[in-house]
Image (spheres, rainbow, N blue to C red):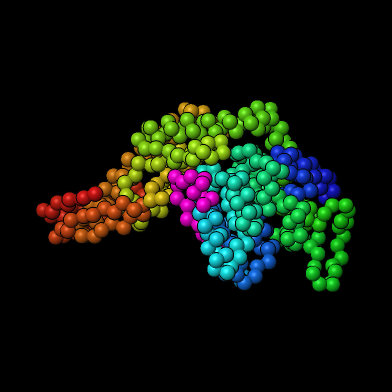
Amino acid sequence: MRYHSISLLDESRAAVAKVLNAPSEEVVFVTNATTGVNIVLRNLVYEEGDVILHFGTIYGACGRTVQYIADTTPATCISIPLAYPVSDASILSSFNTTVQEIKAAGKKPKLVIFDTVSSMPGMRFPWEKMIVAAKEAGVLSLIDGAHGVGNIKIDLGANQPDFFVSNCHKWLYTPRPAAVLFVPIRNQPLITTSVPTSHYYIPKSAAQYWSPLSPGTKSNFILQFEFNGTIDATPYLCVPAALKFRQEIGGEDAIINYCNTLAFEGGEAVAKILGTEIMAPDPAAVDGGRCPMVNIRLPLLSVPKTEVEPVYNTFTKEVGIRENTFVQVYVHNARWWVRISAQVYLEMKDFVWIAGVLKKECEKINERIKSLATIAAATGEKADVANGADVHVEEVRSAKKVVSGMGDLKVSEAEGETVTVKG
């Protein structure tokens, strides 16, 4: 196992490298995209005045990692606001403007992190154009492609980012956890250690540590990621089988095209049933901005901030357990949205079904919100809402008491009083 698994790992690296159009000596496996982002961020050396840039839609754990770097090194970080719908041109303009402002302040924009497809909202990002913009600005590019390989077409040979990481267990159909980290040979000297550090780390000091492992002919970059702690590496070894399965059901282009079409048409069907709309991509973007994920606005009233977590749990936990499914809900740009992913095993009828589930749940939540507004009116308060649409209430002479839980709200009667809700 100790030696045979390495040859299998080499086969997997070669297989995923082909899909990415990258040399196999420039790709290694890590457990997930967040780990890959951490490896890059924690290896770079930061000096006073260095600035790390990212967009407001950065994945939460990656954003926290950037903040950690800012807390523990001389570097600082800047988040570029991003609210959809927005054009690719506007995104690029915001980046260029921010870079100019940083340089004008006498600082150095060192690295920019951006997605292939952001998590929430699930929108295709102009990552190809951002690589070019970063190069022109002299800024290193780190691409979080958690929703990348298998989701959209990826050509690293043509686009040449400085660093790229993508999960294989999300859209490429390998078991989890498995992700691929791409570091071109020109940047491999910047990645001095795996995380955790392996037997093959080369100390900067003269001190040397004996290792029973032979380096062979592979680069130190490849060697460090072959074994850096006891884990179940079988998900990495499943890449060839996953790619074989994908080829048998039609191949990469057929899968991506099917999922893109289903996401768009299914999203439109869900929006029609809910009486809302999809988060429209930029029609001028690559592939019209489409990807296998679609975001539909939920027909929810203004949700008090105290109810954000209960509402979220209603969709992600209660509905998930009851209906044996999962959809992601979130607040973006002052509105509630649901993100639905299209997969090869889904059809239009699945989108219609989930639309019915969502509509019923939204109606129940809206009744709950109305009850809360009634209570706010009774107490003479202005509801503190999470999505920007305040509920204003008239003052009344006595309060009502609410008994709330995750189920229905019950409002006790207040003698002789009525409540009027405005907005």
Q: Nearer the viewer, residue 403 or 139?
A: 139
**Magenta-drawn segment:** 77-93
Q: Is residue 227 visible?
A: no
Decide whether residue 279 is among the magenta residues: no
Number of numbered discs visible in the structure rendering: 0
Q: Which of 334 and 88 is in front in this view?
A: 88
Which residue is drawn at the image coordinates 55% and 61% (left, top)? 100
**Above or below — where is 347 with respect to 175?**
above
Decide whether residue 80 is among the magenta residues: yes
Q: Position of residue 21 (x, y in %)?
A: 72, 41
**Above or below — where is 108 with respect to 415?**
below
Q: Position of residue 348 (x, y in %)?
A: 48, 28
Q: Where is residue 160 in the image (x, y as percent from the top left)?
A: 69, 48
Does residue 306 appear to the left or right of 259 in the view shown? Answer: left
Q: Where is residue 220 in the image (x, y as percent from the top left)?
A: 81, 57
Which residue is drawn at the image coordinates 88% and 52% (left, top)? 217
Residue 111: image quadrant is bottom right
Which residue is drawn at the image coordinates 71% and 50% (left, top)? 182
Q: Which of 212 and 13 is in front in this view?
A: 13
Does residue 29 appear to the left or right of 399 in the view shown? Answer: right
Q: Nearer the viewer, residue 90 or 262?
A: 90
Which residue is drawn at the image coordinates 71% and 32% (left, top)? 244
